[in-house]
Image (tube, rainbow, N blue to C red):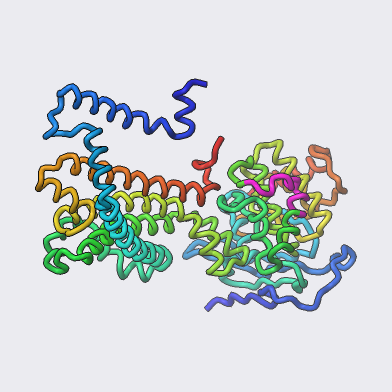
Amino acid sequence: MPAAALTAARSLVATPAQARTIGSVEGRRAFAFKEVGKRFGDKIVLDGISLDVRAGQFLAVIGKSGCGKSTLLRLLAGLDRPTSGSLTFGAAEEGHSRTRFMFQEPRLLPWASVVKNVEIGLTGIAGGTDARQRALAMLDEVGLADRADEWPSVLSGGQKQRVALARALVGQPQILALDEPLGALDALTRIEMQQLLERIWLDQKFTAVLVTHDVGEAVALADRVVVIGAGRIALDLDVPVARPRRHGSAELAHIEGTILDHLFSRV
Amino acid sequence: MSLAIRLARNGAAGWLLPAAIIAGWEAAARAGLIPANVLPAPSAVAEAFWRLTLSGELIRNIGVSTLRALSGFAIGGSIGFVLGLANGLSTLSRGLTDTTLQMIRNIPHLALIPLVILWFGIDEEAKLFLVALGVFFPIYVNTLLGIQSVDPQLVEMGRVYGLDRRALFFRVILPGALPSIFVGLRYALGIMWLTLIVAETISASSGLGYMAMQAREFLLIDVVVLSILIYALLGKLADSLARLLERLSLGWHPAFQKG
């Protein structure tokens, strides 16, 4: 029997509320992977991943397709269980959902209005008019307040993904897991979405884990970039560039170059 | 805007062709091209309609037939819907019943008429049984299909966002299956009338089919034609109601949004 120990704070049961100020967030742990392995049958997807992420950090996970980066995210969101090793979380806070997942596709319910879709993010947290008010406020945040009562089918791809972002964030999660959510968007919409994501992250100070294959996107957004290769962490790099960051600046380009070298010299 | 386009917009265009056919038919009958003992003129059918309405016979027979159709539909449709849901949601239930149901489905239900008459005689049960059986399969098959074709990504999303089983069913699975369920509903309504006509023609002592068969005995061709026309109208009415319901509940579907 492999020890698939998922320690403490697995449920949403709240522990005593903690002040959620930036000061206290610094240095506190959001989650930690300890020697986590994941196998599907004979195939080893993750092979001993250890990763300690502090609360409020923006982490980007890069790797070639099939390297196990999406699996890492699914473990984090509790969609899968590790075959070996353990996964621990920082204390849950009252009134916050712990982990939210943003998929590659918007995955909006076509039969629910935009605001009703956002309210899904408040399942078990708020209901009725309170839920609607919070959903509308979040839609305002992503710039779609005027589309609240429309069907998702009339929105563009970028707008749908913004609704999905609002749904993920309306419950004020402590950790937001993003599985290449911008992958299907065109280049300009993508940059807009990156800026929106950064702005909301700076505002709400959740821990963000972004899985992407776009190195440029990773260095533009993240505090820290982790490269996964052959199921292991191949590179763990801080991105000490002040915000707001300028797209295509020499500093970012240098870091991007380092990561790309690393990706292609190995594996 | 031309008249044709305007008519097409409000759905009246569909009635142009039937109206033209009736006008041509009347003209041909008056000119003596169609003998009255083969096909009576529309005006003769209208006269029969008026005569039977005044005597109350028509309303009574329509009422009897409609009641039979709807009761049979309610019985067969609800069993089909419940089994479709059960088999769509539970592999166990599907494993146990689907093979049996697929075997029964391949028997034309009208082929059971001799057996049904032996079992139930020519009473109401015989007609209810046949209509219920006929209606059951389109509803069952399409409900099952609808549930199986709900986007698994949406179901996963619902789980990730903490929807419980009840909420998952009512907010994700059922709405996702609804377009397919409506296809089954409309198909079943067609089968409902078809089965009832056949059942009433063969064995009945009241209802539209009985009225038509009685008229045939007495060579009242106008009444026979009238019965057939009323079947057509009732079928169309049922279909229109189903479409209205479909439009009301599938407003989110791109196919039902007005441009």
Check residue A146 for magenta coloring: yes
Q: Position of residue A236 (x, y in %)?
A: 74, 56
* Residue at horizontal 18 percent and vertical 43 percent from the top: B224
Left or right, residue B14 beside residue A89: left
Using the rendered image of the protein, determine whether residue A228 is visible from the camera's viewpoint: no
The spot of residue A107 in percent (x, y) is 59, 52
Location of residue A263 with respect to B67 vertically, above or below: above
The residue at the point 68 percent across, 68 percent down is: A33
Farthest residue, direction right: A23
For this view, does A70 lie left or right of residue B222? right
Tell me what residue is drawn at x 55 percent, y 76 percent. Answer: A2
Residue B85 % position (x, y): 41, 64
Front residue of B85 and A172: B85
Is residue A221 shown left or right of residue B72? Answer: right
Where residue A72 sits, quadrant-wise, is: bottom right
> Quick check: A167 above or below A245?
below
Q: Residue B156, percent across and down? A: 55, 60
Tell whether A90 sits left or right of A82: right
Question: Looking at this view, is A134 or B131 the one in front?
Answer: B131
Q: Which residues are magenta?
A: A137-150
The residue shown at (50%, 42%) is B256
Q: Is residue A27 above or below residue A101?
A: below
